[in-house]
Image (tube, helix red, strand yellow):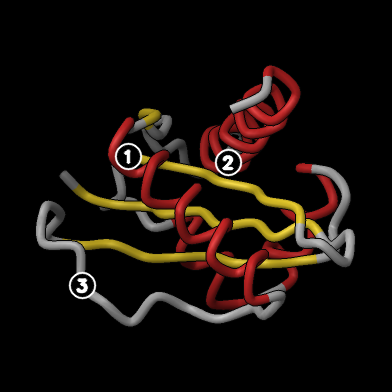
């Protein structure tokens, strides 16, 4: 994975943690970057980019008792994709879910030049 991509994914994780911890009326624990979730999210972003189609993973991931997935495309920065997720009620609920402890992110560029994003949020 390129340094640029890793840098963008780290920014996205920071944005998730800033959203979760910078509230005066509640403070949630920061999410921990999880290697397995990073790998799964990257594979899913790659799959969406190859098919040039946005779709959810309907398979369960048995390593985690609770897991959620946020996906997006055509946002060219972590800040823009995070802003779109915070405007979507389900994605926002996933991001702010107190039971989630771990995070993994992926992004992939399709042949048509669209960026596909995937985030897994999970409870260990």
Label located before the other in sequence (2 or 1):
2
Disc 2/disc 1 C-alpha distance (Å): 11 Å
Q: Return the residue at label 2.
A: 16
From the top left corner, tell me how far across and down residue 40 is, in percent.
Answer: 37, 50
User: Who comes first in sequence, dot 3 or dot 2?
Assistant: 2
**Residue 108 in the figure: left or right of residue 31:** right
Q: How many marks?
A: 3
Among numbered discs 3 and 1, the one appearing first in the sequence: 3
Q: Residue 108's x, y, as percent? A: 67, 51
Between 34 and 52, the residue placed more toward the observer is 52
Q: Nearer the viewer, residue 42 or 60?
A: 42
Q: CA separation, marks 3 and 2?
A: 23 Å
Q: Position of residue 84 (x, y in %)?
A: 77, 64
Q: Position of residue 78 (x, y in %)?
A: 76, 42
**CB under 8 Å between discs 2 and 1:** no
Pointer 3 residue = 60
Q: Quadrant of residue 57?
A: bottom left
Residue ID for mark 1: 102
- Nearest-to-viewer mark from 3 and 1: 3
């Amino acid at each position: 994975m390129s340094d640029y991509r890793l840098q963008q994914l780290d920014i996205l994780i920071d944005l998730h943690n800033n959203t979760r911890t910078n509230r005066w009326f509640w403070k949630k624990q920061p999410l921990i970057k999880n290697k397995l979730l990073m790998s799964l999210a990257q594979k899913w972003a790659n799959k969406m980019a190859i098919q040039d189609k946005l779709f959810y993973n309907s398979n369960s991931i048995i390593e985690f008792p609770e897991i959620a997935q946020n996906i997006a495309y055509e946002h060219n920065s972590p800040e823009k994709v995070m802003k779109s997720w915070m405007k979507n009620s389900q994605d926002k609920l996933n991001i702010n879910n107190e039971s989630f402890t771990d995070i993994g992110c992926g992004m992939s560029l399709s042949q048509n030049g669209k960026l596909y994003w995937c985030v897994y949020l999970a409870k260990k």
